[in-house]
Amino acid sequence: MTQTTALPDPLAEVAPPKKAHGANAWVMWFARRIGLAVLTLWLVSILVFFATAALGDPIRAILGKDYNAQPDRVAQLRDQLNLDDPLLTRYFSWLGGLLQGDLGTSIATLRPVKDLISSNVVNSLVLVLVAAVVMIPVAFGIAMISANYRRRRPDTIIQTILLALAGLPEFVTAILLVAMFSTVVFHWLPAVTLAGAAGHPWDQPKSMILPVAALTLAVAPYVSRIVRATLLEVLDSDYVELARLKGIPETVVMRKHALLNAIVPGIQVIALQLAWLAGGVVFVEFVFSYPGVGFQLVDAVRNHDVPVVQALSMLIAAVYVVVNLVADLLSILLTPRARTAISS
């Protein structure tokens, strides 16, 4: 009796397609990043709500001397803010409304917060976008010039100026720009943003020049210095030296070899600086009376308008988290080694 040996099924020995495995790995990576982003925003919500609740009785701060003289108004505000409920109940009620898109009602204007801040959000997004469009080529251009003249006088001058600008707070830079171009030295540009009640700041382009310049000068030094350091590291590498020995012009070496390798660190630092602008724009908007979320946040704090303060704080935190998430994704997509590590 002969024993029959079954042949192995060739399909059973084949590993799962790498494409499917890579897709699963990317889904898991993205799910983890989304989970961390949601966790971060939840922790921020706890901090924002309990920090505003710890400031004391908002109704007494709003009414001031009229607190004892207007019991009906006090009762109305306490009911509007649910101040008679336990603190945890108020937090979960506020969080539930936040998840449903209900940002509450402004105490100062009695309007829905969503309607109150919508136009200011658009104004701030436009300001940050214009500043980014101006800042990115300026920062990369300065970095390339500085790297091309490294350890020579132009490089020394550029680095000294960048260090001086990096050491100045953004509101100091804004005040210096106003003093130079609007009051003391020149009178070329308006010191405040000119926008009508139904208009937008970009309807008067001259009034946006100084806010954009202040944000650019606050961010560009950091981006330029990081990109310069990366360019110098690439320019000293062996394959760039080999390209020089082949007779490739230095401008081509800088553009096609060094600059391409500096894009990923540049994207990372640009994302961090744009995320910082979500909070740093507050001071610049206040100096120039720019009708954005920063100016509105300062006004809401002054008026003790707690729902507006909470909504704007969460909005700024959400922008910060989303920009960092996008930066991580772009950095990995542009780095072959990182893509391979995730896919495998």
Image: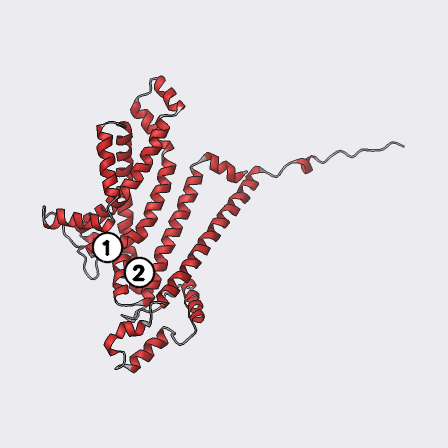
C-alpha separation, residue under disc 1 versus residue under disc 2: 16 Å
Of badges 1 and 2, nearer the viewer stands: 1
Q: Residue at x 39, y 47 (%)?
A: 324
The answer to which quarter of the image holds residue 238 is top left
- Report which residue position mark 2 lands on: 118
Q: Earlier in the sequence, mark 1 or mark 2?
A: 2
Quarter of the rendering occupied by the C terminus: top right
| 298 left or right of 37 in image | left
Q: Secondary structure at mark 2?
A: helix
In the rendered view, tell whether residue 301 sits above or below residue 69.
above
Q: Which one is nearer the viewer's eye here, 29 or 41? A: 41
What mark, if any, has residue 45 been given in the picture?
none
The percent position of residue 180, horizontal first and vertical second, equals 13, 46
The percent position of residue 303, horizontal first and vertical second, equals 26, 67
Q: Secondary structure at mark 1?
A: helix
The percent position of residue 163, horizontal first and vertical second, equals 25, 39
- Report which residue position mark 1 lands on: 285
